[in-house]
Image (cartoon, grey):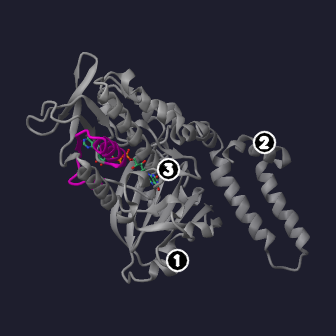
């Protein structure tokens, strides 16, 4: 294909389809190239789809959504204890449900790519892009694994996800961007008796669902990371995500870590009797603002996970909203550049400018410091403190013949000893004050 399409989008994930849809809506004819047998076929995902931007692009009422998130629960697991906080704002039961929905990405990505096709994009599946075609310093197309598979077009959108071999192969991303990477393992579990089990176990009514996040050594052993459970319509997604470096140095395989999490006494009863219907492992870029590559090149832009646009600060795990936002801005910038008949990087610069002004880069920058700091305090935050809080709660509520005041003092002492007294507690609060 020689310039039969206005743009080539590498990868029909959320970022790629958002870019293709945006271009098609404004009269361009993009080609979406996907290596899977259908968009989403290869996706490993928790997860919650965050929809504030996507609902501007498509009619979400027609989308394959599983459940809206009605409860967020954060849980500290030590060896066999759990200390948890549960948030259930009544507001989340009402439209637009805080723009947070569990989805099967195999279904959602296919539907979303179809919206781009209906708007005028062309989708080709089972085709892997193997590299970019350069002329001088400009990117003018891609090579694929098909016979005679070179495709040329004025613009290339690299939306290939976190394992961004094409961008790296073209030296658009440095290998250092691989330093802060998490490895994730996830299972979809089904209950044999299906009807009503999820509602009963997670105390749900109708389409309401839950997002449970877990931290501490009981969730992922000695690694830095956490576990999660999300409810879909008839299944639950259960997984762990933790530092790839820890996976290597501490020899914790994703499968072992997931089994450790699933067998914790606070987790196992939620999953009792369920059988695995799907298993997957994947990497998540977590380098934040510092490892973002240059987003704009002559003839090409990088979007979504390929550009490292994922926020994982322990409280938020967000990549879907960032992928769609970046795809939308990249598509808009290409439309504007095409109107002026220009392809050089400076003509596409409005993409990175808009992204920098948006919540995407602002959030990544706000939490840029967090990863290293948590790494430094890992033992205190993930092992000692969860244990101390569990011991203190148990002490505080111990039923014996001592007066309550003695229990309260002993409980306070247990936490303070771990933190190093008032001085240590204040120091820790100051170190993490930017989190709130
Ligand atoms: P992807 O969704 O990875 O899409 C990339 C697409 O490109 C894929 O379809 C792939 O097959 C295709 N592709 C790759 N290479 C090629 C090639 N060479 N040629 C052709 N096609 C190619 N985010 C949230 O917001 N909420 C969550 O709860 C959440 N949970 C997560 C849980 C797990 C276990 C993981 C791994 C991630 C989670 N994320 C979550 C992050 C989220 O999944 C990503 O941020 C998001 O999917 C990024 O979208 P994307 O379009 O950039 O990339």
Quarter of the figure with the N terminus: top left
| Point 91% across, 75% down: residue | 403
What element does badge 1 sit on? loop
In this view, 248 is above or below 54: above
Q: Residues within 10 Å of mark 2 (few under 14, many from 20)?
A: some
**Is 298 on the left-hand or right-hand side of 359?**
left
Residue sitting at x 42%, y 32%: 351
Circle 3 residue? 318
First reached walking from the N terminus: tag 1 or tag 2: 1
Q: Is residue 403 left or right of residue 78?
A: right
The numbered disc on residue 427 is: 2
Q: Is residue 17 above or below residue 94?
A: above
Q: Residue at the location (31% across, 45% down)?
A: 25
Of the image marks 3 and 1, the number of the one nearer the N terminus: 1
- Rounded to the nearest angstrom, the CA distance separating label 1 from label 2 is 40 Å
Q: Disc 3, ligand 1: is the CB inside 8 Å?
A: yes
Query: In this orientation, which residue lies closer to the viewer: 15 or 202?
Result: 15
Per the model, the C-alpha gap separating discs 3 and 2 is 28 Å
Q: Is residue 88 visible?
A: no
Residue with the mark numbered 1: 204
Rendered location of residue 118, percent (x, y): 24, 53
Tell us which disc is closer to us: 1 or 2.
Answer: 1
Q: Which residues are magenta?
A: 13-42
Marks 3 and 1, how far apart at CA: 24 Å
Q: Name the image quarter holding residue 58.
A: bottom left
Residue 59 rendering spot, x and y as whole percentages: 37, 59
Label 1 lies in ligand 1 vicinity (Cβ under 8 Å): no
Whether the residues at callouts 3 and 2 have beta carbons within 8 Å, the answer is no
Would you say 312 lies left or right of 80 here? left
Picture quadrant of residue 55: bottom left
**x then y, percent, for residue 398:** 79, 75
């Amino acid at each position: 294909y020689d310039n039969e399409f206005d743009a080539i989008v590498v990868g029909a994930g959320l970022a790629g389809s958002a870019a293709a849809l945006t271009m098609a809506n404004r009269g361009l004819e993009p080609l979406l190239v996907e290596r899977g047998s259908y968009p989403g076929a290869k996706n490993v995902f928790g997860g919650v789809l965050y929809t504030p931007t996507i609902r501007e692009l498509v009619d979400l009422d027609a989308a394959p959504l599983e459940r809206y998130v009605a409860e967020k629960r954060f849980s500290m697991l030590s060896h066999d204890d759990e200390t948890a906080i549960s948030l259930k704002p009544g507001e989340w039961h009402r439209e637009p449900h805080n723009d947070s929905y569990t989805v099967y990405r195999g279904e959602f990505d296919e539907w979303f790519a179809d919206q781009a096709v209906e708007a005028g994009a062309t989708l080709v599946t089972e085709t892997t892009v193997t590299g970019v075609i350069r002329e001088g310093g400009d990117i003018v197309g891609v090579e694929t694994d098909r016979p005679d598979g070179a495709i040329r077009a004025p613009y290339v959108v690299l939306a290939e996800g976190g394992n961004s071999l094409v961008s790296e192969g073209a030296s658009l991303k440095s290998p250092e961007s691989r330093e802060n990477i998490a490895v994730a393992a996830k299972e979809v579990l089904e209950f044999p008796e299906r009807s009503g089990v999820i509602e009963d176990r997670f105390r749900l009514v109708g389409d309401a669902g839950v997002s449970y996040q877990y931290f501490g050594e009981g969730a992922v052993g000695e690694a830095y990371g956490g576990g999660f459970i999300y409810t879909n319509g008839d299944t639950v997604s259960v997984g762990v995500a933790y530092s790839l470096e820890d996976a290597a140095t501490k020899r914790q395989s994703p499968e072992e870590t997931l089994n450790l999490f699933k067998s914790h006494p606070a987790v196992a009863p939620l999953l009792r009797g369920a059988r695995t219907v799907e298993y997957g492992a994947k990497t998540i870029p977590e380098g934040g603002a510092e490892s973002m590559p240059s987003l704009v090149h002559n003839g090409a832009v990088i979007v979504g996970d390929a550009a490292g646009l994922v926020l994982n600060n322990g409280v938020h795990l967000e990549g879907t909203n960032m992928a769609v936002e970046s795809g939308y801005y990249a598509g808009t910038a290409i439309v504007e550049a095409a109107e002026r008949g220009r392809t050089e990087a400076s003509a596409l610069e409005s993409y990175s400018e808009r992204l920098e002004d948006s919540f995407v880069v602002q959030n990544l920058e706000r939490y840029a410091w967090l990863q290293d700091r948590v790494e430094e305090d890992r033992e205190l935050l993930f092992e000692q403190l969860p244990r101390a809080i569990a011991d203190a709660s148990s002490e505080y509520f111990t039923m014996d013949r001592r007066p309550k005041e003695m229990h309260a003092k002993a409980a306070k002492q247990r936490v303070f000893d771990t933190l190093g007294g008032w001085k240590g507690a204040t120091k820790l609060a100051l170190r993490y004050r930017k989190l709130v």
